[in-house]
Amino acid sequence: MLGSSRNWQTAGRDLTARFHVLALDLRNHGSSPHDPEMSYAAMADDVLGWLGAQGLPRVTLLGHSMGGKVAMLLACRHPERVERLVVVDIAPKDYHSAEHRAEFAAMNGLDLATLPSRTAAEQGFEAQVSDWAMRKFLATNLERTPEGRWRWQINLPVLTAALLALEADALLPADQFAGETMFIAGGKSRYVKEADRAAILSHFPRARIETIPDSGHNPHMETRAAFVAAILSDSP
């Protein structure tokens, strides 16, 4: 959520050692279209439609955080399209976070009409977002208009309205993917815990769970070498 394919340029390049890598922006994110519907079912359908348009019948599917929930849902509902699943620092469960509320409040409270720079935006987030890295991450979603003003590249109103649904578990109890699956968790992240193992294995019985001790929620950026090595060592 709030990320884009730009965040995957370097790790994606590294993964080309063994894969043909294609990085997507989900709807209402990055360069993808804005749409009033924001749900996991709609995002999974978008990815399926894109795979069909590209003539890709079966792929290794990797998703991080919200993208990981999309990948889990697609794999469970359309297992014939997924040769191998990689889920990065997210588990099949609900995530209700006061931090998310604060981040969205900070973004919605920003006065874009008078904003001089991204640095000023980061400073404006300080009262509600204590983590400097998160402030920088939020500001990456700002872009210049042709007239030189700032605007949100994300569809902020729709994402704000859909936040509760996006924090919820995307899977039903009966959803299952029996194919090869790898979960990568950040050892310093709170998103995947030992208590989540049972839920992971109930939906993904062949899952292997690997923790990168020095990483937080973004192992593809924070500990890129270890992240890429884990994926490449686990691939055929």
Image (tube, grey):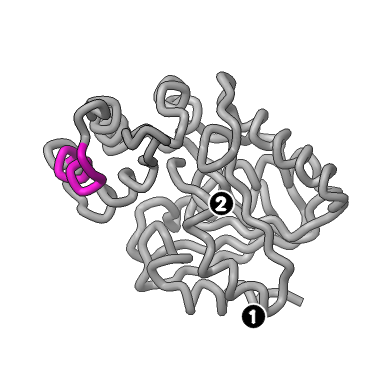
For label 2, the crowd category at 10 Å Cα-Cα, with few meaning under 14, some 14 to 19 and many 20 or more, is few
| Residue in the image at 48% along x and 77% along y | 226
Q: Identity of the amino acid at label 1? A: Ser
Mark 2 or 1: the one toward you: 1
Does the magenta portion include 120? Answer: yes
Magenta highlight range: 116-125
Q: Is residue 107 left or right of residue 226?
A: left
Residue placed most toward the observer, 219 or 158: 158
Res 176 visible: no
Q: Is residue 142 left or right of residue 72?
A: left
| Residue in the image at 52% along x and 60% along y | 8
| Residue in the image at 51% along x and 69% along y | 10
Q: Position of residue 209 (x, y in %)?
A: 56, 65
**Secondary structure beneath label 1:** helix
Mark closest to the chain's N terminus, 2 or 1 = 2
Q: Identity of the amino acid at label 2? A: Ala
Does the magenta portion include 62? Answer: no
Residue marked by disc 2: 198
Q: Give the vertical position of 143 relative to 196 (above or below).
A: above
Separation of disc 2 and disc 1 at Cα? Answer: 24 Å
Q: Position of residue 213 (x, y in %)?
A: 38, 72
Are the two marked residues, 2 and 1, in contact with CB atoms closer than 8 angstroms? no
Q: Give the vertical position of 153 relative to 134 (above or below).
A: above
Residue marked by disc 1: 233
